[in-house]
Image (spheres, coloured by chain):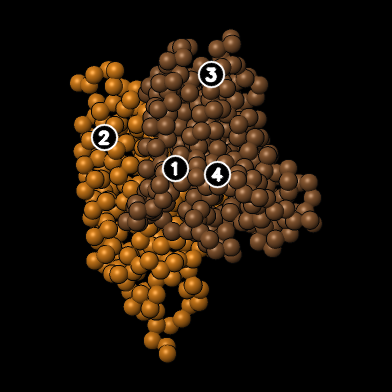
Chain colours: A brown, B orange
Amino acid sequence: MDKRILFNLLQVVVVLLFSPLVAGVTSRLKEMVQSRRGPSIFQPYRDLRKLFHKDEVVSERSSWLFRFTPYLTFVTPLFVTLLIPVLTDYPLFFAFMGDMIAGGFMLSLGGFFATLAAVDSANPYGPMGASRTRMVGFLAEPVFMIVFFTVSFVAGSTIPFIVQQAWVTPPVNFFEPSHILLMLAFLMLIIAEGGRIPVDNPSGHFELAMIDESKTLEYSGRGAALTKWGGYMKTFVLLCIFLNVLVTPWGVAHEQTFAAVMFAVPMVLGKIFCFILVLVVIESSLSKLRLFRIAEFLGAAFITSVAAMITKLFIS
Amino acid sequence: MVYPGLFPWLQSLNALAGGFFLLCAFGLVAVRQAQDCLRLFVAQSLFLCLSAFMLGILLHSSDLIVVGIIDFISKPVVIPWLLRRTVGGEVHTRREITQVFNIPTSLLIALALTIGAYLFAMPLLRAGNAGELIGSNLPIGLAGLLIGAFTMAVRREAVPMALALISMENSAFFAGIAIAPDFPLIAEVSIAFDVLILTFLIGLLTRAVHQQIGTTAVGELTELREANQS
Protein backbone atom coordinates (compact mmCIF):
# COMPACT_ATOMS: atom_id res chain seq x y z
CA MET A 1 0.00 0.00 0.00
CA ASP A 2 2.69 2.49 1.00
CA LYS A 3 4.60 1.38 -2.08
CA ARG A 4 1.72 2.52 -4.23
CA ILE A 5 1.75 5.95 -2.63
CA LEU A 6 5.46 6.10 -3.27
CA PHE A 7 5.04 5.16 -6.95
CA ASN A 8 2.29 7.69 -7.27
CA LEU A 9 4.51 10.43 -5.94
CA LEU A 10 7.32 9.18 -8.16
CA GLN A 11 5.04 9.76 -11.16
CA VAL A 12 4.62 13.37 -10.08
CA VAL A 13 8.37 13.78 -9.77
CA VAL A 14 8.92 12.29 -13.22
CA VAL A 15 6.39 14.67 -14.74
CA LEU A 16 7.97 17.62 -12.93
CA LEU A 17 11.50 16.77 -13.97
CA PHE A 18 11.10 15.56 -17.53
CA SER A 19 8.38 17.80 -18.95
CA PRO A 20 10.81 20.64 -19.82
CA LEU A 21 13.04 18.08 -21.52
CA VAL A 22 10.17 17.06 -23.80
CA ALA A 23 9.62 20.71 -24.74
CA GLY A 24 13.36 21.14 -25.35
CA VAL A 25 13.61 18.08 -27.57
CA THR A 26 10.57 19.18 -29.56
CA SER A 27 11.95 22.62 -30.33
CA ARG A 28 15.41 21.23 -31.10
CA LEU A 29 14.00 18.69 -33.52
CA LYS A 30 11.90 21.32 -35.23
CA GLU A 31 14.93 23.52 -35.73
CA MET A 32 16.88 20.56 -37.07
CA VAL A 33 14.15 19.84 -39.62
CA GLN A 34 14.47 23.44 -40.79
CA SER A 35 18.24 22.76 -41.14
CA ARG A 36 19.23 25.03 -38.30
CA ARG A 37 21.06 24.04 -35.18
CA GLY A 38 18.56 25.20 -32.62
CA PRO A 39 18.95 25.61 -28.87
CA SER A 40 20.18 22.86 -26.59
CA ILE A 41 17.56 20.38 -25.44
CA PHE A 42 18.17 21.62 -21.88
CA GLN A 43 17.29 25.20 -22.79
CA PRO A 44 13.86 25.07 -21.08
CA TYR A 45 15.57 24.19 -17.77
CA ARG A 46 17.88 27.18 -18.15
CA ASP A 47 14.95 29.41 -19.02
CA LEU A 48 13.07 28.27 -15.95
CA ARG A 49 16.09 28.82 -13.67
CA LYS A 50 16.66 32.26 -15.11
CA LEU A 51 13.02 33.23 -14.69
CA PHE A 52 12.92 31.97 -11.09
CA HIS A 53 15.84 34.24 -10.23
CA LYS A 54 14.31 37.34 -11.75
CA ASP A 55 12.08 39.88 -10.08
CA GLU A 56 8.39 39.78 -10.78
CA VAL A 57 6.49 42.82 -12.00
CA VAL A 58 2.77 42.86 -11.29
CA SER A 59 0.48 45.62 -12.44
CA GLU A 60 -1.13 47.66 -9.65
CA ARG A 61 -4.45 47.45 -11.42
CA SER A 62 -4.57 43.68 -11.53
CA SER A 63 -6.42 41.70 -8.91
CA TRP A 64 -5.62 38.57 -6.90
CA LEU A 65 -6.56 36.44 -9.92
CA PHE A 66 -3.46 37.52 -11.75
CA ARG A 67 -1.17 36.45 -8.89
CA PHE A 68 -3.08 33.27 -8.09
CA THR A 69 -3.25 31.86 -11.61
CA PRO A 70 0.42 30.78 -12.11
CA TYR A 71 0.20 28.57 -9.04
CA LEU A 72 -3.00 27.01 -10.28
CA THR A 73 -1.67 26.33 -13.78
CA PHE A 74 1.37 24.78 -12.13
CA VAL A 75 -0.54 22.57 -9.73
CA THR A 76 -3.43 21.25 -11.86
CA PRO A 77 -1.30 19.02 -14.16
CA LEU A 78 0.32 17.56 -11.07
CA PHE A 79 -3.06 16.59 -9.67
CA VAL A 80 -4.00 14.98 -12.97
CA THR A 81 -0.73 13.05 -12.82
CA LEU A 82 -1.97 11.37 -9.68
CA LEU A 83 -4.93 9.95 -11.60
CA ILE A 84 -3.37 8.68 -14.82
CA PRO A 85 -0.95 5.86 -15.63
CA VAL A 86 2.43 7.43 -16.27
CA LEU A 87 4.69 4.59 -15.21
CA THR A 88 2.53 1.63 -14.17
CA ASP A 89 -0.27 -0.43 -15.64
CA TYR A 90 -1.94 -1.17 -12.29
CA PRO A 91 -3.99 1.42 -10.41
CA LEU A 92 -2.00 3.45 -7.92
CA PHE A 93 -3.05 4.85 -4.60
CA PHE A 94 -4.90 7.94 -5.83
CA ALA A 95 -6.23 6.37 -9.04
CA PHE A 96 -9.78 6.01 -7.75
CA MET A 97 -9.90 9.56 -6.46
CA GLY A 98 -11.12 10.70 -9.87
CA ASP A 99 -11.60 9.43 -13.40
CA MET A 100 -10.71 10.78 -16.82
CA ILE A 101 -13.55 13.27 -16.70
CA ALA A 102 -12.20 14.66 -13.45
CA GLY A 103 -8.79 14.92 -15.08
CA GLY A 104 -10.27 16.78 -18.03
CA PHE A 105 -12.07 19.16 -15.69
CA MET A 106 -8.92 19.80 -13.72
CA LEU A 107 -6.91 20.62 -16.81
CA SER A 108 -9.62 22.94 -18.05
CA LEU A 109 -9.76 24.60 -14.62
CA GLY A 110 -6.19 25.76 -15.17
CA GLY A 111 -7.15 26.98 -18.63
CA PHE A 112 -10.17 28.81 -17.25
CA PHE A 113 -8.11 30.72 -14.70
CA ALA A 114 -5.45 31.49 -17.30
CA THR A 115 -8.19 33.07 -19.41
CA LEU A 116 -9.46 35.13 -16.49
CA ALA A 117 -5.94 36.28 -15.64
CA ALA A 118 -5.33 37.30 -19.24
CA VAL A 119 -8.45 39.47 -19.18
CA ASP A 120 -7.45 40.77 -15.75
CA SER A 121 -4.03 41.93 -16.94
CA ALA A 122 -5.69 44.55 -19.22
CA ASN A 123 -3.05 44.01 -21.85
CA PRO A 124 -5.00 44.38 -25.12
CA TYR A 125 -3.52 41.18 -26.53
CA GLY A 126 -4.40 39.14 -23.45
CA PRO A 127 -8.19 39.14 -23.85
CA MET A 128 -7.83 38.60 -27.59
CA GLY A 129 -5.76 35.49 -27.06
CA ALA A 130 -8.05 34.42 -24.25
CA SER A 131 -11.15 34.63 -26.40
CA ARG A 132 -9.40 32.72 -29.18
CA THR A 133 -8.34 30.02 -26.74
CA ARG A 134 -11.93 29.77 -25.57
CA MET A 135 -13.05 29.40 -29.18
CA VAL A 136 -10.63 26.55 -29.76
CA GLY A 137 -11.54 25.13 -26.37
CA PHE A 138 -15.26 25.05 -26.88
CA LEU A 139 -14.85 23.50 -30.32
CA ALA A 140 -12.54 20.88 -28.85
CA GLU A 141 -14.89 20.11 -25.97
CA PRO A 142 -17.41 17.92 -27.88
CA VAL A 143 -14.53 15.89 -29.30
CA PHE A 144 -13.16 15.34 -25.80
CA MET A 145 -16.55 14.20 -24.59
CA ILE A 146 -17.12 11.76 -27.45
CA VAL A 147 -13.60 10.35 -27.09
CA PHE A 148 -14.00 9.87 -23.34
CA PHE A 149 -17.46 8.34 -23.60
CA THR A 150 -16.44 5.95 -26.36
CA VAL A 151 -13.36 4.90 -24.47
CA SER A 152 -15.26 4.33 -21.28
CA PHE A 153 -18.05 2.55 -23.14
CA VAL A 154 -15.52 0.11 -24.54
CA ALA A 155 -13.75 -0.43 -21.26
CA GLY A 156 -16.81 -0.26 -19.04
CA SER A 157 -15.02 2.18 -16.81
CA THR A 158 -13.78 5.75 -16.76
CA ILE A 159 -10.67 5.03 -14.71
CA PRO A 160 -7.73 5.37 -17.12
CA PHE A 161 -5.85 2.43 -15.61
CA ILE A 162 -8.67 0.09 -16.56
CA VAL A 163 -9.25 1.66 -19.97
CA GLN A 164 -5.60 1.06 -20.75
CA GLN A 165 -6.07 -2.69 -20.81
CA ALA A 166 -9.28 -2.80 -22.82
CA TRP A 167 -7.70 -2.02 -26.19
CA VAL A 168 -5.07 -4.75 -26.08
CA THR A 169 -6.87 -7.72 -24.53
CA PRO A 170 -6.96 -9.56 -26.90
CA PRO A 171 -4.28 -7.81 -28.98
CA VAL A 172 -6.47 -7.88 -32.08
CA ASN A 173 -8.60 -5.19 -30.45
CA PHE A 174 -5.83 -2.77 -31.23
CA PHE A 175 -6.87 -2.72 -34.89
CA GLU A 176 -10.52 -2.07 -34.25
CA PRO A 177 -11.72 0.86 -36.35
CA SER A 178 -13.04 2.65 -33.29
CA HIS A 179 -9.62 2.46 -31.66
CA ILE A 180 -7.68 3.78 -34.64
CA LEU A 181 -10.22 6.52 -35.32
CA LEU A 182 -10.18 7.56 -31.67
CA MET A 183 -6.41 7.77 -31.83
CA LEU A 184 -6.70 10.06 -34.84
CA ALA A 185 -9.28 12.25 -33.14
CA PHE A 186 -7.23 12.50 -29.97
CA LEU A 187 -4.13 13.36 -31.96
CA MET A 188 -5.99 16.27 -33.52
CA LEU A 189 -7.12 17.29 -30.03
CA ILE A 190 -3.56 17.28 -28.74
CA ILE A 191 -2.55 19.48 -31.64
CA ALA A 192 -5.40 21.89 -30.96
CA GLU A 193 -5.04 21.97 -27.18
CA GLY A 194 -1.26 22.16 -27.22
CA GLY A 195 -1.30 25.04 -29.67
CA ARG A 196 0.59 23.08 -32.30
CA ILE A 197 1.02 24.17 -35.86
CA PRO A 198 -2.09 23.66 -37.92
CA VAL A 199 -3.94 25.49 -35.17
CA ASP A 200 -1.41 27.79 -33.55
CA ASN A 201 2.27 28.51 -33.93
CA PRO A 202 4.02 27.91 -30.61
CA SER A 203 7.21 29.65 -31.68
CA GLY A 204 5.56 32.69 -33.23
CA HIS A 205 6.30 36.08 -31.71
CA PHE A 206 3.67 38.11 -33.51
CA GLU A 207 1.07 39.15 -30.95
CA LEU A 208 -1.81 39.55 -33.38
CA ALA A 209 -1.51 35.97 -34.58
CA MET A 210 -1.07 34.40 -31.17
CA ILE A 211 -3.62 32.11 -29.63
CA ASP A 212 -2.08 30.42 -26.63
CA GLU A 213 0.99 32.53 -25.96
CA SER A 214 -0.62 35.91 -25.62
CA LYS A 215 -2.34 34.94 -22.38
CA THR A 216 0.97 34.82 -20.57
CA LEU A 217 2.55 37.93 -22.10
CA GLU A 218 2.13 39.96 -18.91
CA TYR A 219 3.87 37.48 -16.63
CA SER A 220 7.45 37.95 -15.57
CA GLY A 221 9.83 36.33 -13.14
CA ARG A 222 8.40 33.57 -11.02
CA GLY A 223 4.90 33.88 -12.47
CA ALA A 224 6.22 33.36 -15.99
CA ALA A 225 8.34 30.42 -14.84
CA LEU A 226 5.38 28.71 -13.16
CA THR A 227 3.07 29.26 -16.12
CA LYS A 228 5.67 27.94 -18.54
CA TRP A 229 6.43 24.91 -16.44
CA GLY A 230 2.71 24.28 -16.04
CA GLY A 231 2.34 24.42 -19.80
CA TYR A 232 5.15 21.88 -20.28
CA MET A 233 3.57 19.59 -17.71
CA LYS A 234 0.15 19.87 -19.32
CA THR A 235 1.64 18.74 -22.63
CA PHE A 236 3.45 15.89 -20.88
CA VAL A 237 0.28 14.76 -19.14
CA LEU A 238 -1.72 14.86 -22.38
CA LEU A 239 0.97 12.86 -24.13
CA CYS A 240 0.94 10.32 -21.28
CA ILE A 241 -2.82 9.94 -21.56
CA PHE A 242 -2.56 9.60 -25.32
CA LEU A 243 0.35 7.15 -25.38
CA ASN A 244 -0.20 5.10 -22.22
CA VAL A 245 -3.97 4.90 -22.30
CA LEU A 246 -4.95 5.09 -25.94
CA VAL A 247 -2.10 4.15 -28.26
CA THR A 248 0.58 1.94 -26.75
CA PRO A 249 -0.15 0.50 -23.30
CA TRP A 250 3.16 -1.35 -23.50
CA GLY A 251 6.39 -0.34 -21.85
CA VAL A 252 4.91 0.63 -18.50
CA ALA A 253 5.70 -1.29 -15.33
CA HIS A 254 3.69 -4.42 -14.66
CA GLU A 255 5.32 -5.69 -11.44
CA GLN A 256 5.00 -3.81 -8.22
CA THR A 257 8.71 -3.53 -7.69
CA PHE A 258 10.84 -0.46 -7.49
CA ALA A 259 13.16 -1.68 -10.25
CA ALA A 260 10.31 -2.23 -12.71
CA VAL A 261 8.94 1.25 -12.08
CA MET A 262 12.36 2.82 -12.51
CA PHE A 263 12.83 0.86 -15.71
CA ALA A 264 9.52 2.24 -16.98
CA VAL A 265 10.86 5.81 -16.87
CA PRO A 266 13.21 5.50 -19.88
CA MET A 267 10.61 3.37 -21.69
CA VAL A 268 7.90 5.99 -21.33
CA LEU A 269 10.30 8.78 -22.26
CA GLY A 270 11.34 6.76 -25.32
CA LYS A 271 7.70 6.40 -26.35
CA ILE A 272 7.15 10.11 -25.91
CA PHE A 273 10.19 10.93 -28.02
CA CYS A 274 9.02 8.61 -30.78
CA PHE A 275 5.71 10.42 -30.73
CA ILE A 276 7.47 13.79 -30.79
CA LEU A 277 9.10 12.72 -34.05
CA VAL A 278 5.63 12.20 -35.53
CA LEU A 279 4.49 15.53 -34.14
CA VAL A 280 7.51 17.32 -35.61
CA VAL A 281 6.80 15.81 -39.02
CA ILE A 282 3.19 17.00 -38.79
CA GLU A 283 4.23 20.45 -37.66
CA SER A 284 6.91 20.84 -40.29
CA SER A 285 4.80 19.70 -43.19
CA LEU A 286 1.68 21.75 -42.55
CA SER A 287 1.09 25.46 -42.46
CA LYS A 288 -0.89 27.31 -39.87
CA LEU A 289 -4.60 27.50 -40.53
CA ARG A 290 -6.42 30.78 -40.69
CA LEU A 291 -8.33 31.46 -37.51
CA PHE A 292 -11.79 30.68 -38.82
CA ARG A 293 -10.61 27.47 -40.42
CA ILE A 294 -9.84 26.05 -36.99
CA ALA A 295 -13.53 25.24 -36.77
CA GLU A 296 -13.09 23.01 -39.82
CA PHE A 297 -10.05 21.29 -38.33
CA LEU A 298 -11.88 20.53 -35.12
CA GLY A 299 -14.99 19.65 -37.09
CA ALA A 300 -12.93 16.97 -38.79
CA ALA A 301 -11.77 15.77 -35.37
CA PHE A 302 -15.39 15.65 -34.22
CA ILE A 303 -16.46 13.65 -37.26
CA THR A 304 -13.61 11.22 -36.68
CA SER A 305 -14.52 10.70 -33.06
CA VAL A 306 -18.20 10.23 -33.82
CA ALA A 307 -17.35 7.75 -36.57
CA ALA A 308 -15.30 5.89 -33.98
CA MET A 309 -18.25 5.93 -31.62
CA ILE A 310 -20.89 4.69 -34.04
CA THR A 311 -18.77 1.90 -35.46
CA LYS A 312 -18.50 0.63 -31.91
CA LEU A 313 -21.86 1.54 -30.45
CA PHE A 314 -24.17 0.08 -33.07
CA ILE A 315 -22.29 -3.09 -33.85
CA SER A 316 -21.55 -4.42 -30.39
CA MET B 1 -6.48 -22.39 -46.67
CA VAL B 2 -5.83 -19.74 -44.01
CA TYR B 3 -4.47 -20.21 -40.55
CA PRO B 4 -7.59 -19.85 -38.33
CA GLY B 5 -5.83 -17.68 -35.75
CA LEU B 6 -5.58 -15.05 -38.44
CA PHE B 7 -9.34 -14.70 -38.80
CA PRO B 8 -10.02 -12.13 -36.08
CA TRP B 9 -7.13 -10.03 -37.38
CA LEU B 10 -8.48 -10.04 -40.92
CA GLN B 11 -11.94 -9.26 -39.62
CA SER B 12 -10.60 -6.37 -37.62
CA LEU B 13 -8.58 -5.05 -40.55
CA ASN B 14 -11.67 -5.28 -42.74
CA ALA B 15 -13.58 -3.19 -40.21
CA LEU B 16 -10.67 -0.77 -40.09
CA ALA B 17 -10.71 -0.41 -43.86
CA GLY B 18 -14.42 0.34 -43.45
CA GLY B 19 -13.68 3.06 -40.92
CA PHE B 20 -11.22 4.77 -43.23
CA PHE B 21 -13.58 4.28 -46.17
CA LEU B 22 -16.17 6.25 -44.21
CA LEU B 23 -13.63 8.96 -43.38
CA CYS B 24 -12.79 9.32 -47.08
CA ALA B 25 -16.48 9.78 -47.82
CA PHE B 26 -16.59 12.55 -45.20
CA GLY B 27 -13.48 14.05 -46.75
CA LEU B 28 -15.13 14.17 -50.17
CA VAL B 29 -17.83 16.41 -48.72
CA ALA B 30 -15.42 18.67 -46.94
CA VAL B 31 -12.16 19.28 -48.77
CA ARG B 32 -11.61 22.50 -50.65
CA GLN B 33 -9.59 21.53 -53.69
CA ALA B 34 -10.59 19.39 -56.66
CA GLN B 35 -7.19 17.73 -56.51
CA ASP B 36 -7.78 16.62 -52.92
CA CYS B 37 -11.17 15.24 -53.91
CA LEU B 38 -9.45 13.06 -56.48
CA ARG B 39 -6.84 11.89 -53.97
CA LEU B 40 -9.52 11.03 -51.43
CA PHE B 41 -11.45 9.12 -54.05
CA VAL B 42 -8.32 7.13 -54.89
CA ALA B 43 -7.77 6.41 -51.20
CA GLN B 44 -11.38 5.32 -50.82
CA SER B 45 -11.05 2.93 -53.75
CA LEU B 46 -7.90 1.47 -52.22
CA PHE B 47 -9.74 0.81 -48.96
CA LEU B 48 -12.50 -0.84 -50.99
CA CYS B 49 -9.90 -3.11 -52.60
CA LEU B 50 -8.41 -3.90 -49.21
CA SER B 51 -11.82 -4.87 -47.88
CA ALA B 52 -12.47 -7.00 -50.97
CA PHE B 53 -9.21 -8.89 -50.44
CA MET B 54 -9.92 -9.45 -46.75
CA LEU B 55 -13.42 -10.68 -47.45
CA GLY B 56 -12.12 -12.85 -50.26
CA ILE B 57 -9.76 -14.59 -47.87
CA LEU B 58 -12.28 -14.79 -45.06
CA LEU B 59 -15.14 -16.13 -47.15
CA HIS B 60 -12.93 -18.33 -49.35
CA SER B 61 -14.22 -16.55 -52.41
CA SER B 62 -11.78 -16.22 -55.29
CA ASP B 63 -14.33 -14.04 -57.09
CA LEU B 64 -13.90 -11.32 -54.53
CA ILE B 65 -10.16 -11.32 -55.00
CA VAL B 66 -10.64 -10.89 -58.73
CA VAL B 67 -13.08 -8.06 -57.99
CA GLY B 68 -10.45 -6.50 -55.77
CA ILE B 69 -7.86 -6.72 -58.52
CA ILE B 70 -10.22 -5.22 -61.10
CA ASP B 71 -10.99 -2.39 -58.70
CA PHE B 72 -7.34 -1.91 -57.96
CA ILE B 73 -6.64 -1.38 -61.63
CA SER B 74 -9.73 0.53 -62.69
CA LYS B 75 -10.40 3.00 -59.90
CA PRO B 76 -7.10 4.29 -58.54
CA VAL B 77 -5.35 4.20 -61.93
CA VAL B 78 -7.67 4.31 -64.89
CA ILE B 79 -10.32 6.71 -63.62
CA PRO B 80 -7.89 9.51 -62.67
CA TRP B 81 -6.19 9.03 -66.01
CA LEU B 82 -9.52 9.13 -67.86
CA LEU B 83 -10.63 12.25 -66.04
CA ARG B 84 -7.32 13.91 -66.78
CA ARG B 85 -7.57 13.01 -70.46
CA THR B 86 -11.15 14.18 -70.89
CA VAL B 87 -11.52 17.09 -68.51
CA GLY B 88 -7.98 18.37 -68.65
CA GLY B 89 -6.21 20.47 -66.06
CA GLU B 90 -9.41 21.22 -64.14
CA VAL B 91 -9.01 17.92 -62.28
CA HIS B 92 -5.75 18.95 -60.72
CA THR B 93 -6.49 22.56 -59.87
CA ARG B 94 -5.60 23.77 -56.44
CA ARG B 95 -8.25 26.44 -56.79
CA GLU B 96 -10.62 26.59 -53.85
CA ILE B 97 -14.05 25.34 -54.72
CA THR B 98 -17.14 26.48 -52.93
CA GLN B 99 -20.06 24.59 -51.50
CA VAL B 100 -23.68 25.38 -50.91
CA PHE B 101 -23.27 25.08 -47.13
CA ASN B 102 -20.15 25.90 -45.19
CA ILE B 103 -17.89 23.01 -44.30
CA PRO B 104 -18.86 22.33 -40.66
CA THR B 105 -22.56 22.36 -41.58
CA SER B 106 -22.13 19.91 -44.44
CA LEU B 107 -19.98 17.69 -42.24
CA LEU B 108 -22.68 17.64 -39.59
CA ILE B 109 -25.35 16.78 -42.16
CA ALA B 110 -23.14 13.98 -43.46
CA LEU B 111 -22.78 12.78 -39.89
CA ALA B 112 -26.54 12.73 -39.44
CA LEU B 113 -26.81 10.71 -42.67
CA THR B 114 -24.30 8.21 -41.31
CA ILE B 115 -26.18 7.75 -38.09
CA GLY B 116 -29.33 7.36 -40.18
CA ALA B 117 -27.62 4.68 -42.25
CA TYR B 118 -26.72 2.77 -39.11
CA LEU B 119 -30.27 3.06 -37.84
CA PHE B 120 -31.62 1.72 -41.15
CA ALA B 121 -29.10 -1.08 -41.25
CA MET B 122 -29.52 -2.31 -37.70
CA PRO B 123 -32.97 -3.94 -38.10
CA LEU B 124 -31.79 -5.57 -41.33
CA LEU B 125 -28.73 -6.97 -39.65
CA ARG B 126 -30.74 -8.23 -36.72
CA ALA B 127 -33.45 -9.76 -38.89
CA GLY B 128 -30.94 -11.42 -41.21
CA ASN B 129 -28.92 -12.67 -38.27
CA ALA B 130 -25.89 -11.33 -40.09
CA GLY B 131 -22.35 -11.96 -39.02
CA GLU B 132 -19.74 -9.43 -38.10
CA LEU B 133 -18.54 -8.97 -41.67
CA ILE B 134 -21.87 -7.79 -43.02
CA GLY B 135 -22.29 -5.89 -39.77
CA SER B 136 -19.28 -3.77 -40.56
CA ASN B 137 -19.68 -3.43 -44.32
CA LEU B 138 -23.40 -2.91 -44.87
CA PRO B 139 -23.94 0.20 -42.70
CA ILE B 140 -20.75 1.83 -43.93
CA GLY B 141 -21.65 1.17 -47.55
CA LEU B 142 -25.11 2.57 -46.94
CA ALA B 143 -23.66 5.63 -45.23
CA GLY B 144 -21.25 6.10 -48.12
CA LEU B 145 -24.16 6.00 -50.58
CA LEU B 146 -26.09 8.65 -48.67
CA ILE B 147 -23.04 10.85 -48.18
CA GLY B 148 -22.17 10.53 -51.87
CA ALA B 149 -25.66 11.64 -52.87
CA PHE B 150 -25.41 14.52 -50.44
CA THR B 151 -22.02 15.49 -51.85
CA MET B 152 -23.48 15.60 -55.35
CA ALA B 153 -26.18 17.92 -54.10
CA VAL B 154 -23.92 20.18 -52.13
CA ARG B 155 -20.95 20.58 -54.47
CA ARG B 156 -21.01 23.19 -57.19
CA GLU B 157 -18.20 21.88 -59.35
CA ALA B 158 -18.45 19.22 -62.03
CA VAL B 159 -15.36 17.21 -61.11
CA PRO B 160 -16.14 16.70 -57.40
CA MET B 161 -19.72 15.89 -58.38
CA ALA B 162 -18.52 13.21 -60.76
CA LEU B 163 -16.20 11.83 -58.11
CA ALA B 164 -19.08 11.76 -55.63
CA LEU B 165 -21.12 9.78 -58.12
CA ILE B 166 -18.36 7.20 -58.55
CA SER B 167 -17.82 7.10 -54.81
CA MET B 168 -21.50 6.19 -54.47
CA GLU B 169 -20.74 3.25 -56.72
CA ASN B 170 -17.77 2.47 -54.48
CA SER B 171 -20.06 2.41 -51.47
CA ALA B 172 -22.59 0.17 -53.17
CA PHE B 173 -19.74 -2.22 -53.92
CA PHE B 174 -18.50 -1.98 -50.38
CA ALA B 175 -21.85 -3.14 -49.03
CA GLY B 176 -22.33 -5.58 -51.88
CA ILE B 177 -19.14 -7.57 -51.45
CA ALA B 178 -20.17 -8.46 -47.91
CA ILE B 179 -23.82 -9.26 -48.65
CA ALA B 180 -23.35 -11.22 -51.84
CA PRO B 181 -19.83 -12.63 -52.07
CA ASP B 182 -20.97 -15.18 -54.65
CA PHE B 183 -22.31 -12.63 -57.06
CA PRO B 184 -21.47 -13.75 -60.61
CA LEU B 185 -18.12 -12.43 -61.68
CA ILE B 186 -19.40 -11.36 -65.10
CA ALA B 187 -21.79 -8.90 -63.45
CA GLU B 188 -19.00 -7.40 -61.39
CA VAL B 189 -16.82 -7.01 -64.46
CA SER B 190 -19.59 -5.36 -66.41
CA ILE B 191 -20.26 -2.96 -63.55
CA ALA B 192 -16.59 -2.04 -63.39
CA PHE B 193 -16.64 -1.43 -67.15
CA ASP B 194 -19.82 0.62 -66.81
CA VAL B 195 -18.14 2.87 -64.32
CA LEU B 196 -15.33 3.55 -66.74
CA ILE B 197 -17.79 4.44 -69.51
CA LEU B 198 -19.67 6.64 -67.08
CA THR B 199 -16.52 8.46 -66.09
CA PHE B 200 -15.63 8.91 -69.71
CA LEU B 201 -19.04 10.40 -70.51
CA ILE B 202 -19.02 12.69 -67.50
CA GLY B 203 -15.54 13.79 -68.45
CA LEU B 204 -16.60 14.65 -71.99
CA LEU B 205 -19.65 16.49 -70.72
CA THR B 206 -17.55 18.47 -68.27
CA ARG B 207 -15.14 19.31 -71.03
CA ALA B 208 -18.00 20.55 -73.20
CA VAL B 209 -19.31 22.68 -70.34
CA HIS B 210 -15.85 24.03 -69.76
CA GLN B 211 -15.43 24.96 -73.41
CA GLN B 212 -18.82 26.59 -73.55
CA ILE B 213 -18.75 28.73 -70.43
CA GLY B 214 -15.14 28.71 -69.36
CA THR B 215 -15.64 27.14 -65.97
CA THR B 216 -16.69 23.87 -64.46
CA ALA B 217 -18.68 25.48 -61.68
CA VAL B 218 -21.91 23.92 -62.83
CA GLY B 219 -23.68 24.97 -59.64
CA GLU B 220 -23.93 28.46 -61.06
CA LEU B 221 -25.71 27.38 -64.23
CA THR B 222 -29.24 28.22 -63.23
CA GLU B 223 -30.72 29.74 -66.37
CA LEU B 224 -31.82 28.18 -69.63
CA ARG B 225 -30.38 29.81 -72.68
CA GLU B 226 -30.19 29.01 -76.38
CA ALA B 227 -26.86 27.81 -77.58
CA ASN B 228 -25.89 30.36 -80.22
CA GLN B 229 -27.45 33.40 -78.66
CA SER B 230 -24.82 36.02 -78.03
Q: Chain of mark 2?
A: B
Q: Nearer the viewer, mark 2 or mark 1?
A: 1
Q: Residue furthest bottom?
A: B230
Q: Nearer the viewer, mark 1 or mark 3?
A: 1
Q: How far is the residue under mark 3 from the one under mark 4?
A: 26 Å
Q: Which residue is mark 1?
A: A42
Q: For mark 3, does the 10 Å Cα neighbourhood hold few (<14), some (14 to 19), or many (20 or more) residues?
A: many
Where disc 2 sits, the SS reads helix
Residue B104 sits in quarter:
bottom right
- A250 to A225, vertically: above or below: above
For disc 3, the marked residue is: A7
For the residue pair A206 and A167, the one nearer the viewer reads as A206
Residue that numbered label 4 is attached to: A48
Give me the residue at 28% from left, 26% from top: B58
Amino acid carrying label 2: it is Phe
Residue B64, disc: none
Camera-nearest residue between A244 and B99? A244
Q: Is residue B177 visible?
A: yes
The circle on residue B53 is 2
Q: Residues within 10 Å of mark 1 (few under 14, many from 20)?
A: some
CA separation in Å, label 1 and label 3: 26 Å
